[in-house]
Amino acid sequence: MPIKILDSQTAERIAAGEVIEDPASVVKELVENSLDAGANQIEISVTQGGKRQIKVTDNGSGIAPSELVPAFSRFATSKLSSLEDLEDITSLGFRGEALPSIAAVSRVTLTSRRKEDFSAMRLRLEGGAGGPPFEVGAPEGTEVVVEDLFYNTPGRLKFLRGAGREMARISSLITNLALAHPECAFTLVSEKRTVLRTTGDGSLLHAIGALYGNEAAAAMLPLRRRDPAGEILLSGFLSAPHFSRASRRWITIVVNGRVIRSPLLAGALERAYGGMLGRQRHPVAVLLLQVPPALLDINVHPAKSEIRFHRPELFNELVFRAARAVLHSPPGWEAGPSWNEEQQRGRKQEGRLQQELLLKPDQLPEAIRGEGPVPPAGDLPSPGEGWEAGRASRAASESGASYSAAEANRGCRLIGQFLYSYLVAQRGEELLLIDQHAAHERVLYHALLSSEPGQRSSQLTVPLNLELPPAWRERFTEIRPFLDEAGFKLEPFGDNSYILRGVPFSVREVGEAGIYALLEELLQEEPAPGEEEREQVLKTIACHRAVKARQPLARAEAEQLLQDWEKTPGAAFCPHGRPTVLRFHRRELDRGFQRKGGRR
Ligand code: ADP
Ligand code: MG
C-alpha cells in the first residue's frame, strides 16, 4: 500500500485514543482542568456510566470568549509556553491535548463565563467540528457536557465495559482526586443519585471520613516527615495495623497535587508494616508528597498517571522510614526529627516546622475552639483541687532535678486533670492534652473488638430488672447477639422483661436509667449492614461505658487510662474519628515565651 498522509480528522481520532480510553479518562481530564482553573466546587454527573453523558461543572476562573475555539485545537494550552517551563510545572494539565481529543470522539458542549464577563459563551462540537460560539446566560465557571463517547469510532465503542463497571472506575477516580484535593468540594452524581460528596473544608481526615467512612477515619494515623535534605515533604495518613483492606486500591499517592500510580512507594509503605498486616491484606493510606518539580519527570505518560522520580531511592526510603516510625512508636506518635537534628539544620526551617505537630483549628474538638458548651462557672474545679498535682513538681525543683533523657523514654507521665475533662501529660519534650472521654472510648472500643465474646463482662451485685417497651422488641432481637458479645448478661424473664446480671467493663455507675439510655440509643440507630452493624453497636457501647467529660478521676484511674490509651492501636483518634490528643512541643512553647531554645 502506498504511503499517504492521513486526513486530519482520522489523525485526530487516532491521537485521541492516547489520552481518552474510557469515560473515566474523560472525567479525569475535565476535573483536572477544573482544578487547574482554581475551582473549589466541582460537580460531576454521569448517565450510563458516562457512556451516554458526562457533565462536569466547576466554579473556576472560566475561559475568555476569544479563547473558546483555540482551547479545542491540539497543543493549545494556557499552562506552558516553552520546554523550559516543563521543568517546574505546577498545573495538572500542560499538554493541551485533552479538549481536542475529547471533542474528536464525542459531542461536546462547553459553556464558560469569567467573573469579569456579563454573559457566558457556549460552543458545540460534534466529532471535533462545529461552532461558532454563541452567547448564553450561565453562572461563573465552566460546564462541559460530553455525550455519546466514541459514537464515531465503533472500534473503541465496542471495548467499553458495562455501565456499572465504567461507573466504578469513575467513582474510584473521583475518590482519589477528592483525597488529593480536600480543599475542593466534590460531588459525584450517577443517574441523579449522589454517590460521593466531600465538603471541601480542607481537612484530609474529613475527606477520608466522607469517602471511606468514619471507621476508616478513626483508624488513621497522621504522618509527616521530610527527607534528610529537607527538600521533600511527606504528609498524610495511614491506617493503624488493625484496619486493612483486601486490595491496594485504598492506597492513594499524590505528588504535587497529582494522583499517581507508584508500585515503588506502595511497596515501601507496605514493607513498613512488616508482618503486622494479615496475608493478602493492604493498608488504607493517603500519602501526599510535596516535591521540587526539578526532582521529577511528569511527562512520561499521556494520562500523566505515572511519573519518574530522578532519585527513586530517596522517596522509597522516606516513605518506609516515615511509616515505620509511626507504626512502631507508641500509637499516635509520629517520629519527627529530633530536637538536635533540627537545630543543626538551622533556623531557616523554623517557620515551616511550626504547624507540623498540631492539628488544624478546624480539626479541634469544639470545646477547644471555644464553640462548644462551656460548663457553668460553679462547676469548675479550682486549680490544684483534686490530687496533689503540684507536689511532684515542687519536689523536683527543690531537689534541683531537671528533665532527663531517661525520662524522655519512659512514655507518658501524668501531670494532672484539667477541668475534670482533659488529662494533662508529658511525654519526652511534648505536653499532651488528652480528651479523657474520647481516649477512654477508643480504649474500650478496641477492647470490645479484640476480646472473646463475654470476656469483658463484670457481674452486678444487685441484678436489674429491665422491662422493654414492645416497640423495641424487634430491633432488640437483632442487636441482642452484639449485646451478649460485649458482655451484657441478660436473662429473659417473662414476655418483655429481662434480668440484667452483668455489664461490660467495671460496674461503677450502672443504673437503670443509664442502661435504658444505652438501649434506647442502640435501638434507634439505623442498622448498618453485617460487620459494620457489629462495629456500630460496639462503638455505641464503648461511648456509654467511657468516662465522661467533667468527671473527676482518682489519680490511679487517670494513670490507668493514660497507660491503656498509649498501648491502644489507633489511639490518636476516638472511634468516631475525632482526635483524642493535642500535642505541644517544647519548641513551640519556647517560641511562645520567646526563649531562644536555651534551658534557663
Ligand atoms: P491543558 O489542560 O493541557 O492545558 P486542555 O486541552 O485540557 O489542555 O485544555 C486547554 C485549555 O483550555 C487549558 O489550557 C485552559 O486554558 C482551558 N480550559 C479547559 N478547561 C477549563 C476549565 N474548566 N476552566 C478554565 N479553563 C479551562
Ligand atoms: Mg487539561
Image: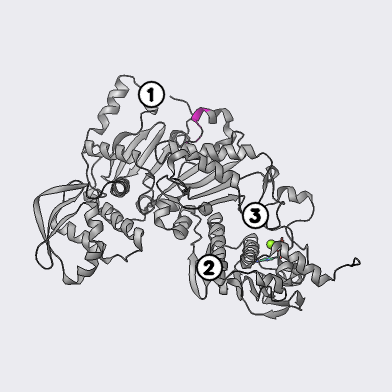
Answer whether labels 1 and 3 touch (C-beta < 8 Å): no
Q: Is residue 115 magenta?
A: no
Q: Amino acid type of disc 3?
A: Ser
Quarter of the image with the C terminus is top left
Within-10-Å neighbours for mark 3: few <14, some 14–19, many 20+: some
Ligand 2 neighbours mark 1 (CB distance < 8 Å): no
Q: Residue at x 57, y 67 (%)?
A: 166
- Location of residue 349 by image quarter: top right
Tell me how far mark 3 sits from mark 2, CA to CA: 21 Å
In the image, is residue 277 above or below residue 50?
above
Task: Tell me if residue 285 can be seen.
Answer: yes
Answer whether labels 2 and 1 touch (C-beta < 8 Å): no
Q: Nearer the viewer, mark 2 or mark 1?
A: 2
Give the number of callouts. 3
| Helix, strand or loop for the magenta stretch, by majority | loop
- Location of residue 569 by image quarter: top left
Q: Nearer the viewer, mark 1 or mark 3?
A: 3
Expressed as whole percent of the image width and height from the top left, the position of residue 537 reads 29, 58
Within-10-Å neighbours for mark 2: few <14, some 14–19, many 20+: many
Relative side of 302 to 28, left or right: right
Q: Residue at x 34, y 34 (%)?
A: 412
Residue beneath label 2, please? 188
Q: Earlier in the sequence, mark 3 or mark 2?
A: 2
In the image, is residue 245 above or below residue 71?
above
Expressed as whole percent of the image width and height from the top left, the position of residue 391 reads 25, 28
Q: Which residues are magenta?
A: 335-340
